[in-house]
Image: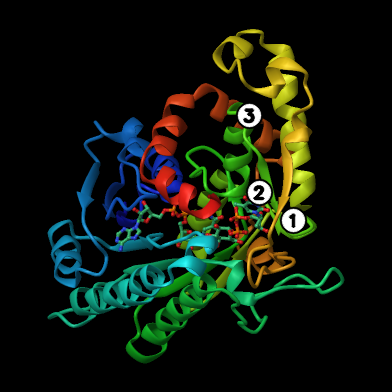
Amino acid sequence: MKILLVTGGAGFIGANFVHYWLQRYPADKVVVLDALTYAGNIANLDTVKGNENFTFVHGNICDQSLVEYLLAKHEIDTVVHFAAESHVDRSITGPDAFIETNIIGTYSLLKAAKKVWLDGDAVLEGHRFHHVSTDEVYGTLSATDLAFTEDTAYAPNSPYSASKAASDHLVRAYHHTFGLNVTTSNCSNNYGPFHFPEKLIPLVITNILHNKALPIYGDGQQIRDWLYVEDHAYGIDLVLQNGRIGENYNIGGNNEWANIDIVKTISKLVEQEFINNEELAKRFPTAIAAIDKNTESLITYVKDRPGHDRRYAIDATKTNDELGYQPKESFESGIAKTVQWYLTNAAWWQSVIDGSYQSWIKEQYS
Ligand code: NAD
Ligand code: DAU
């Protein structure tokens, strides 16, 4: 039985991980530590609220004494560290929060883990600090480059990816120097339920339903490697169970798409949903999908993201071979489920859009 501290568990991937974990390991205990920034949403954890093995703590990972207190009080043996500032565009307009949370916050967690697990009277056997990182630390690929492996040299290009790279290095150093039991996973782009609608896929779905422009940065030919979020949780599970201490594991879906093609695919899927279900036209009467079905006409090419990475692609051979990892969801089924989820959970994204995100997006696009 494990007792987990999940940082950032009220965010997109963290919340999906908590759902996954408590379903798969109902006897385990999960404590979530989350600062509930604009991206954190306690409603993402509604389904586990009454679970006696689940505890939510509103707090900041930079608060080292709080983390030490939680590790000791709950007898935590496993940290799964998701908490981060995660949106590349925000790291360009305001990098400070990325340095604070992603670098200082990770450092603070490492110090707390070392103090409680290693520096007391006895080392806590079997402890684990799992750090959730990204493929963006490897930089960018051309169309013909081989996919990123765990041996690809780090070359981060945005303040976001630079801050994640710095945190990865600190995690590695705490293992090498102090003997902390760490693992790190570097995952490609996730999509699925509870994805905050500032990111491409949920932004496109919700904008289609609101009859708003679908902004394509630059020429729209940038490539991302998409993975259904539950398959990310599954990959982390395998790393926690059988990953070797001190190692990095790439997690990816072998599923590269140009942005413009993703947007066109989603447009078609939403149109099809409106054809299949007449109720949708009543719920979203201004959506083009409810009127003349030419959703793609909402596509609007806009100024490119500064320093925009051209292509990401994950080579997950090590994770596949060592841990037996294979994503369970195909892109076809995953994206269809995701569109369905946004159609059924309009109250969730509507309240997110009406919140703080609204003023930020106004600033960006006015
Ligand atoms: P998110 O922005 O949806 O959620 C981040 C969560 O962290 C929020 O709940 C927020 O309130 C919390 N948080 C932020 N700062 C905090 C602080 N100082 N203290 C405590 N909590 C804080 O992010 P996400 O997309 O779920 O990403 C989770 C992790 O996975 C991140 O580390 C990210 O770098 C990594 N990752 C994301 C993707 C992706 O496609 N989204 C892919 C690979 C890796
Ligand atoms: O690769 C993993 C990373 O994926 C994670 O580490 C990040 O936390 C996560 O946010 C994501 O980063 P991206 O920058 O790839 O995701 P985003 O959804 O912001 O953008 C996906 C692509 O779509 C990217 O090439 C930029 C482009 N884009 C994005 C938005 C929001 C557009 O063309 N228009 C848009 O409006």
Task: Identify the residue position indicated by label 1 in the image.
Answer: 254
From the viewer's perspective, is 125 left or right of 326?
A: left
From the viewer's perspective, is 81 left or right of 250?
A: left
Report the residue at 52% width, 42% height from top. Answer: 197
Which dot, 3 or 2, sits closer to the camera?
3
Tell which circle, 3 or 2, labels the residue nearer the N-terminal end: 3
Q: Is residue 325 above or below residue 133?
A: above
Which dot, 3 or 1, sits closer to the camera?
3
Residue 242 appears in view: yes
Q: How is the image coloured?
A: rainbow
Report the residue at 67% width, 80% height from top. Answer: 152
Q: Secondary structure at mark 2?
A: loop
Per the rendering, the mark at residue 327 is 2
Tell which circle, 3 or 1, labels the residue nearer the N-terminal end: 3
Residue extending furthest toward the right = 144
Query: Marks 1 and 2, how far apart in space?
Result: 9 Å
